[in-house]
Each structure stands twice: as structure tokens, then as C-alpha cells.
Amino acid sequence: MKHFAQLSKFAVGIAMAAGALALAPSAAMAGTSTGNLAVSATVINDCLIVPGTLAFGNYDPTLSTPTNATANMQITCTMGDSYTVALGVGTGVGATDVGRKMTLAAGSTTLTYGIYSDTNRTVNWGGSSTVSGTGTGALQTLTAYGQIAPQQAQVTAGVYTDTVVATVNY
């Protein structure tokens, strides 16, 4: 009988261990199921423009040659986007697309200048004349070529400034 009691205790112990193993997480998996995670994004058409500074430096109204300067504008547009860049007339009184006006800081005297899209300064950049391109997704540089006409005798010595708005349409 003693032997039977030990055997019964052993059987109960095995049954308890088996029950505990049944409740424990199994390392072996019974099957596999898959599903698809939908992923999407919409790339938008966008452009960013950062105009530079067109700084002529010193202008001597007695010289017979024009004073030239350049300014670089940085533009980044979505790859494949067509864009145009337009320049406004500026803030000088009486300014036009072909005759922009810088104004003396302490007065109303103006100094006439032009902005062009070509190195020879023959293609005015303003009004309906724009610069166009296609975005690459990377930074692109556009150059504005400025020129102050020579011998503008009706100017007073001092600092002249203007602000021209650059607009990118895409």
C-alpha cells in the first residue's frame, strides 16, 4: 500500500506538472496568418524661394559706364514642377518694370536701375517677362543681373535702397 501511495503522489505530481506546462506559453506556434498594412503619402507641388541681395556698392554719377551687380536667388521646387519667377517693380516712387527706382534714405531723390535675366543685361526681368524652370527637388540658383545707368546727374550723395518682391508661381 505504501508503494501505491507513493505512486499516487507521483502521478498527481506529473499531472500537476503537465497542467502547468499546458498553461505556460508554448515555444512552438500552431500556425501563421498574414495581412497587409496599407501605406500611403501624397507628394505635393511646392516651391520655396529665397531672394538674395542686389548690392551695387558705390555709384559714381560722373562716369560714362554703367554700374553692374548680380544677386543669386535660391529656389527649391518639387521634382518635375514647372515654375516661373516674377519680379515686382519695387517700392520707389515712379518705378516701372523697366525703370526701377532706389530712394535716398533721407529724402525723396531716386536712382534708376534695371534688373535683367541675362548676363548681357538685355532681357528685362519684370512685368510679363519672367524666368521659368522645372523643379529638381534640389536647390537651384537663379541669377538676377542688375545695372544702374551711367551719368544720372540728378542724384544726391547718400545711401539709396529699394525692395523688390520675387514671386514664384508653380
Image (spheres, rainbow, N blue to C red):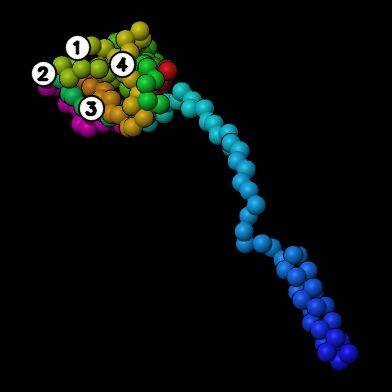
Q: Amino acid at mark 4?
A: Val
For residue 39, which numbered disc appears in the image? none
Residue at image mark 4 = 131
The residue shown at (20%, 31%) is 58
Judged left or right of residue 111, residue 67 is left
- Is residue 162 visible in the rendered image? The answer is no
> What is the quadrant of residue 154 in the picture?
top left
Query: Foreground residue, 2 or 69?
Result: 2
Q: Nearer the viewer, mark 4 or mark 3?
A: 4
> Which comes before the other along the chain, label 3 or label 1?
3
Residue at image mark 3 = 70
> Which comes before the other along the chain, label 1 or label 4?
1
Q: Is residue 56 magenta?
A: yes
Residue at image mark 1 = 122
Range of residues picked out in magenta: 51-65
Q: Amino acid at mark 3?
A: Thr
- Dots 2 and 4: beta carbons under 8 Å? no
Q: CA distance from mark 3 to mark 1?
A: 14 Å
Percent coordinates x, y for residue 19 in the rendering = 78, 69
